[in-house]
Image (spheres, rainbow, N blue to C red):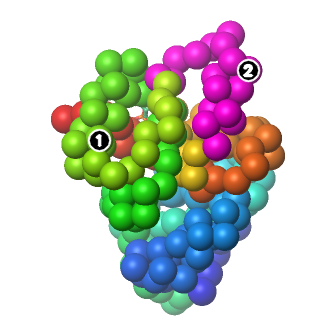
Amino acid sequence: NHVSIMDIHFISTTKTNLLSDELIPRLKNKEKCFIVTANPEIVMQTKEDAQFKHIVQTADFVVPDGVGIVIASKHKKQPIKERIPGFDLMLDLLKYANDNQLSCYFLGAKDYINNKAVSEINRRFPYLKVAGHHHGYFKGKESEVLREMKATKADLVFVALGSPQQERWIHKNIDQFSHGLFMGVGGSFDVLSG
Ligand code: UDP
């Protein structure tokens, strides 16, 4: 259930099945998981940056975000089942966290955006536990932020630093966490904050 486009192995399944067959079982088992949602821009970046390509290749799931990926897969005569927008996948994960009272950490975006996004998440998903949150401009305070995040032992960690910075951050730090589903979510906090 994978389709390879320029050496990036995309998952070819529906959002519903990705959640029920892969992500929810991992959350239940407290297995660590790294999700990259990749659009054509990200695929092009991997072409120019071998280190970033390696990082994307270490992800547990590369999700086809963007019609361009689906079109490319059709050209290869290996059509990907469904485009899975990262924002929609994040909302489904938040809903699951809400239904199961899991804890989530929100890293990234400008301070006021981060605060507004977390308020909106609290409003929409009142039973989800906000383990913590921090804006995405923490140069010189990396280890402090990491220490705080690790201490929360969050079940899900959403990282909104933009690509490739968010994927680099997850790749660099995931080993230090005991568990957690880690996902780069780009401009999603900006969208949520309205
Ligand atoms: N961002 C951040 N720290 C940085 C650079 C960017 O938190 O050092 C945030 C930015 O405020 C925005 C998010 O990253 O909320 C995504 O940015 P962008 O839309 O440029 O990324 P994309 O969605 O295109 O990957």
Label 2 residue near ligand 1, CB within 8 Å: no
Residue 26, quarter of picture: bottom right
| Picture quadrant of ligand 1 | top left
Q: Which of 103 and 15 is in front in this view?
A: 103
How far apart in space, not on screen, are marks 1 and 2 (Cα)?
A: 27 Å
Q: Residue reaching furthest left? A: 194
Q: Mark 2 points at which residue?
A: 143
Q: Quadrant of the N terminus?
A: bottom right
Image position of 109 with respect to 157: above or below: above
- Check disc 1: other Cα within 10 Å, few if <14, some if 14-19, many if 20+: some
Task: Report how many numbered discs are placed on residues in the image.
Answer: 2
**Residue 86 belongs to magenta span:** no
Residue numbers of the magenta segment: 135-153
The percent coordinates of residue 15 (x first, y second) are: 41, 75
Mark 1 belongs to which amino acid? Answer: Asn
The percent coordinates of residue 101 (x first, y second) are: 43, 57
Q: Mark 1 points at which residue?
A: 122
Residue occupying the point 43% across, 45% down: 129
For marks 1 and 2 on the same chain, the one whose residue lies earlier in the sequence: 1
Residue occupying the point 43% across, 63% down: 100
Q: Examine the rendering and report whether any part of residue 165 can be seen.
A: yes
**Residue 139 belongs to magenta span:** yes
The percent coordinates of residue 71 (x first, y second) are: 41, 74
The percent coordinates of residue 57 (x first, y second) are: 73, 60
Q: What element carries label 1?
A: helix
Which mark is on residue 6? none
Q: Nearer the viewer, residue 70 or 106?
A: 106
